[in-house]
Image (cartoon, rainbow, N blue to C red):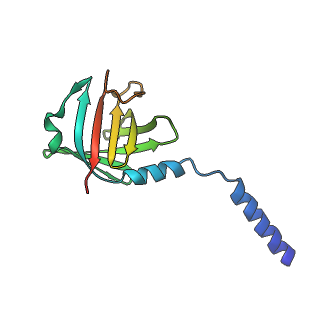
Amino acid sequence: MRSIATLALLGLSLTVMAQEPGPDDTSMADLKALQGTWQLIKAVKEGKNTDKEVKAVTMVIEKDSLTIKDGKRDERVTIKVDPKKKPHEIDLEVGKGKSRIVKGIYKLEKDQLSIRFGEPGKDRPTSFDGKGDGGLLVFRRKK
């Protein structure tokens, strides 16, 4: 009886050791770090500052959804992050029914979050310079 229990325990240990961390383990940790309410502090679209309306814009990240609020409307999208990529990748699933994927990159530095996104259907940006298609949004975490 004791040898059966030992074999079962050994088999369970080997199974657990053989399993690699799930593909979302790192993503879940990064997604958790992004949770909260963020105030937009800078916006660049096609290389031009569009900072005029930034004070009215906030972003709330809860679980796997991101909601942009501008005082007039709330726009909610589903997000997926991949912090294993350099730079870290973020995908926004926009629209209901026939959804589109907006590909982007992000970096989190203390309480500042920068998101550079491309145009729907276009390639993912590779830098945070804000030049070219798409845009750059910089947020500060609200306390």
Query: Where residue 99 sits in the image (x, y, percent)?
Result: 35, 37
Q: On the rendered image, what quadrant is the C terminus found in?
A: bottom left
- Relative placement, left or right, of 1 versus 105 is right
Which residue is drawn at the image coordinates 73% and 63% (left, top)?
13
Q: Is residue 89 above or below residue 124?
A: below
Which residue is drawn at the image coordinates 22% and 41% (left, top)?
41
Q: Is residue 143 above or below residue 100?
A: below
Res 51 quadrant in image = top left
Q: On the rendered image, what quadrant is the N terminus found in?
A: bottom right
Res 125 quadrant in image = top left
- Relative placement, left or right, of 16 versus 116 is right
Res 75 quadrant in image = top left
Q: Is residue 129 above or below residue 93?
A: above
Which residue is drawn at the image coordinates 41% and 39% (left, top)?
90
Q: Is residue 97 visible?
A: no
- Relative placement, left or right, of 11 versus 46 is right
Which residue is drawn at the image coordinates 14% and 46% (left, top)?
71
The foreground one among 66 and 32 is: 32
Q: Residue furthest top?
A: 132
